[in-house]
Amino acid sequence: MLTFQKLETERIVLDEVKMQDAPYVFAALSDPAVTQFYGMEPLQSIDEAERVISSFRCGLQEGRVIRWGMFCKEAGRFLGTIGLHQVNRSNRRAEIGYELHPDHWKKGFANEAMGAVLSYCFEELDLLRVGAMVYPENEASASLVEKQGFKKEGLLRSYYYHGGKTYDANVYALLREDWVSEQDNYGN
């Protein structure tokens, strides 16, 4: 059973995405620059954003998804979302994914949020593995997961299909023992 837990970092509050956040979810997921590496077509309406938020709730109830909204502590602004999907408690693994509105790119928010979610994965959920699927062209995400200690494991050909085309995905993973070793190296 998954239960939602609010997380905090120095600059970010990771909290539940609520229906009132639909305009912000729409602003991010309607932007082709965001969705080009998200595995979906850009949203076309607020109703679609509300369905995305509902899917986060359903996924949590089913024990397969946890999704947090990233909110800037200073201004309370919605930055994007980050979460776990394909949560498999019996095999102690999940996949991580995120998106940020372009206004918040290259400011370290995704790195900060991912660090908090990984701590939650390994300390609270007691996972052994967290995976990430990254489009080969998405150099920013590849850099982010590598900075967090993920190792590239291979390429899945034609893994995503959207916009009438197939896309490959690089498979990355962070194992618990590697994460613990990194934490020990940095004295965390």
Image (spheres, rainbow, N blue to C red):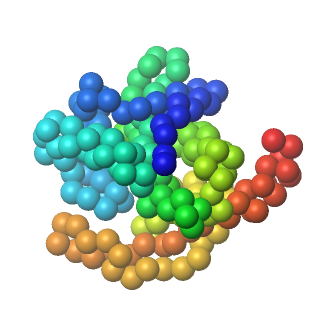
Name the residue: 17% across, 72% down. 164
Q: Position of residue 146 (x, y in %)?
A: 63, 60
Compare residues 154 and 177 and report the one nearer the observer.
177
Name the residue: 26% across, 59% down. 40
How many numbered marks, from 0 up?
0
Vertical order, 147 against 91 (above or below): above
- Residue most toward the bottom? 157
Vertical order, 37 against 156 (above or below): above
Q: Position of residue 80 (x, y in %)?
A: 40, 38
Q: Is residue 47 visible?
A: yes
Compare residues 117 and 106 and report the one nearer the observer.
117
Q: Is residue 79 visible?
A: no
Q: Quadrant of the C terminus?
A: top right
- Residue most toward the top? 75
Compare residues 2 and 31 and report the one nearer the observer.
2
Vertical order, 171 against 116 (above or below): below
Q: Position of residue 165 (x, y in %)?
A: 22, 74
161 relative position to 146: left or right: left
13 relative position to 123: left or right: left
Name the residue: 39% across, 82% down. 157
161 relative position to 15: left or right: left
Q: Position of residue 161 (x, y in %)?
A: 26, 71
